[in-house]
Image (cartoon, rainbow, N blue to C red):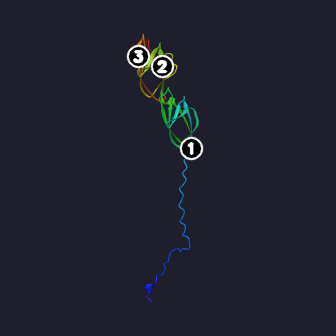
């Protein structure tokens, strides 16, 4: 008989239908990403400061142990007698960063001695009448003008350049000729 009437022989397959397909290797599960553990910050400021961390008010120094996410943070320190001071601090996971900052190191302190007395201005703004001087004059680093005015002895001016951390005394005798 001619071979045309017969169906072709079955083809060989890799797996027989009675065997289950081989399991594909399990896809690796994505690694569980945990945020780094927080760190802590202890902060002391001389004389004292109101503290913002990354723009959020956290209180007045001293700060004992503030929990913070690990990484860099911006601290803004304010005290009405000083210009605002900003520092960056790195907080490590699971560790405590300790910072001790002196606002006095960021400004100059000027003690003024005036005889007999004068109204004292700083850069054209009235500051105080001296004596008495209850607190030092706190100035930002740079050039400043101190004006002294007495109704009988007239006015005088002193120009000074102030450095950060500097302490200086300025003496003015209003009753002596210039």
Q: Position of residue 130 (x, y in %)?
A: 48, 16
Q: Nearer the viewer, mark 2 or mark 1?
A: 1
Q: Position of residue 147 (x, y in %)?
A: 42, 18
Q: Are marks 2 and 3 in contact (CB under 8 Å)?
A: no
Q: Position of residue 8 (x, y in %)?
A: 46, 81
Q: Describe the element under mark 3 as helix, strand or loop.
A: strand
Local packing at callout 2 (Cα closer than 10 Å; few below 14, some 14-19, many 20+) is some
Local packing at callout 1 (Cα closer than 10 Å; few below 14, some 14-19, many 20+) is some
Q: Position of residue 41 (x, y in %)?
A: 56, 38
Residues under labels 2 and 1: Cα distance?
48 Å
Q: Describe the element under mark 2 as helix, strand or loop.
A: strand
Residue lying at the far bottom of the rendered structure: 1
Please tell me which residue is depicted at 52% across the width and 41% down the height of the picture: 90
Residues under labels 1 and 3: Cα distance?
57 Å
* Quarter the C terminus occupies: top left
- Whichever of labels 2 and 1 marks the residue nearer the N terminus, that label is 1
Foreground: 24 or 47?
A: 24
- Whichever of labels 2 and 3 marks the residue nearer the N terminus, that label is 2
**Residue pointed to by mark 1:** 38
Residue lying at the far front of the rendered structure: 5
* Quarter the N terminus occupies: bottom left
**Relative to 47, residue 174 above or below:** above
**Residue pointed to by mark 3:** 156
- Whichever of labels 1 and 3 marks the residue nearer the N terminus, that label is 1
Local packing at callout 3 (Cα closer than 10 Å; few below 14, some 14-19, many 20+) is some
């Amino acid at each position: 008989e001619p071979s045309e009437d017969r169906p072709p022989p079955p083809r060989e397959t890799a797996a027989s239908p009675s065997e289950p397909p081989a399991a594909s290797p399990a896809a690796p599960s994505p690694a569980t990403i945990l945020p780094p553990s927080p760190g802590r910050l202890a902060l002391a400021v001389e004389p004292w400061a109101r503290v913002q961390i990354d723009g959020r008010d956290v209180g007045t120094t001293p700060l004992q142990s503030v929990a913070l996410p690990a990484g860099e943070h911006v601290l803004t320190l304010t005290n009405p007698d000083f210009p605002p001071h900003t520092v960056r601090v790195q907080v490590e996971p699971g560790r405590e960063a300790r910072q001790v900052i002196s606002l006095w190191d960021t400004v100059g302190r000027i003690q003024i001695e005036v005889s007999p007395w004068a109204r004292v201005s700083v850069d054209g703004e009235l500051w105080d009448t001296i004596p008495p001087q209850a607190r030092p004059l706190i100035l930002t680093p740079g050039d400043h003008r101190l004006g002294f005015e007495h109704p009988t002895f007239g006015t005088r001016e002193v120009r000074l350049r102030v450095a950060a951390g500097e302490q200086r005394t300025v003496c003015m005798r209003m009753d002596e000729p210039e």
